[in-house]
Image (tube, rainbow, N blue to C red):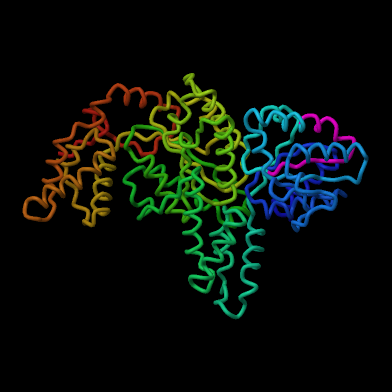
Amino acid sequence: MPTRSQTAAADIAALTRARNAVLWVNSAEEKRVELYLAQACQSAGYMPVFWDCAAGLTDLSGKRIAGTSDEHADPGITLDMIAAKARARTDRMVWIMRDLHKWMDGPIGIRTLRQLRNLSRELPPLGHTIIILAPSGAIPPELAGGDAIVIEWPLPDRDEIGALLDTALKPHEGKIEPLNGQRDAAIDAAVGLSGLEAEACFAKSLVQSRRIDPVLIAGEKKRVIARAGVLEWFDPLPGGLDAVGGLDNLKSWLTARKAAYSPRARAYGLPAPRGALLVGVPGCGKSLTAKAVATAWGVPLLRLDLGAIKSKYVGESESNLRKAFRTIESVGRCVVWLDEIEKALAGATQGAADGGVSADALGAVLSWMQERTGEAFVIATANDVTSLPPELMRKGRWDELWSIDLPTATERHAIISAALRSHGREPLALFPPLIKATEGFTGAEIAALVPDALFTAFADGERALTLTDLAEAAARVVPLSQTAKEKIDRLREWAKGRARPATTREAEAEAGSGRAIDLD
């Protein structure tokens, strides 16, 4: 099976043979991509020539093309020469131009853009193609109308990463520790990086430990992904789903979905899980669940902040999104967390004056979620579900839509126990007055009682924490269910019949919030 880059190179060769005049290739990996472009040109019967503003016209090795001079470092002169050679019916050629996008900015870029648009009409019958190799997808609107075809060059897949690993190891055979069955783990750790980044990670591992260390590579990968600025890598949540109190229906569903990644499940014909949308009361475990499921499944957790990728420059927001989606697809099996998605996409439904950026982001997210083929599991959280567009919530985008309500009596006890464990304390026996006192509390409000009570116990002679300390801390809290009662009531009413409850319903008395069992 061909690699992703080989498939992209085959597309370039086909587009060249089809006499497309201008191709715009998005990639920051010049060295790796240029090798594939040269192969594509040769397979199509075209001669590749490279240009940049420092070296002028060269071959792949950097040797200057005969008959050219320093003046050809000027893009205008080079484009004029390309037109002259094409009219002279010379050999079929592909002109691969680096950094040309910088010569299209501002008023001085008007001439370059006009030259390219003229060539896009003139070159097709003459057997010449221009490939613009650029690190950004912000193609000028003058070319986006059909004068240029945009190709998003993929990050290296597992086979390519494996080849890079073998290349890194070959010069050091006999001087370093053998992989000893760690080859797949090392490849998994590097998937999602560019070719240059993967090579740098392998080299650093060899220098530091004289072996390929998947843990070291994964740590470097975390730093590289964070540096890109479009995704945020989160460390695993200690305890996994056990750190989440309650939500038994949701946790059982997530545990069952993990089995769908096994080889036996694939052989059975189970599709890879796509994701879940969690809606409900703020502070009741939506974000915590996203962090916990990545730990439970043993996969990376990547947070995609749709608000942070927005840019004031036209086209850059879309470019950032495409970059994030490519990275996610390349990482493979992972959990992607979209937190408070309704805020990031508010402009798409509320007419925000952001130049249509939110609407474009919504369209890009919807298209990606519908068409993606990778193994990423997407968990999106939303507090105000009424502001979400209907097309985002339909079946097919998600495996399930979950409603998370205020915790029941059983859940309140589980949350207190989980919070005590996270602070190094043993869970305490069921204490009905405390369960009653936390009626109507969110999960976050209940978990916050533990550190509050610890402060009290520490100030009182550093004694042991007691249930009375927790009950007194609860008495000082005005819960969200009172301060935002109308909003929570509307959210609950909306969830009836529209979303699957994350918690098994209990036979509860109608008192206060209507959710707590009277245990007195």
Residue at image position (40%, 42%) is 249
Q: Tell me which corner region of the image, top left, top right, bottom left or bottom right, holds residue 426.
A: bottom left
The magenta stretch spans residue 128:
yes
Q: Taking 64 as reference, is 97 above or below it?
A: above
Residue at image position (40%, 24%) is 494
- In the image, which residues are magenta? 117-133
Name the residue furthest top.
351
Q: Is residue 66 left or right of residue 260?
A: right
Q: Taking 366 as reference, is 466 above or below it?
A: below
- Percent coordinates x, y for residue 352 in the rendering: 47, 21
Q: Tell me which corner region of the image, top left, top right, bottom left or bottom right, holds residue 267.
A: bottom right
- Percent coordinates x, y for residue 367 in the rendering: 60, 34
Residue at image position (45%, 33%) is 341
Residue in the foreground of this view, choosing between 376 and 428: 376
- Percent coordinates x, y for residue 109 in the rendering: 67, 31
Name the residue furthest bottom.
174
| Quadrant of the snapshot with the C terminus | top left
Q: Is residue 105 left or right of residue 482?
A: right
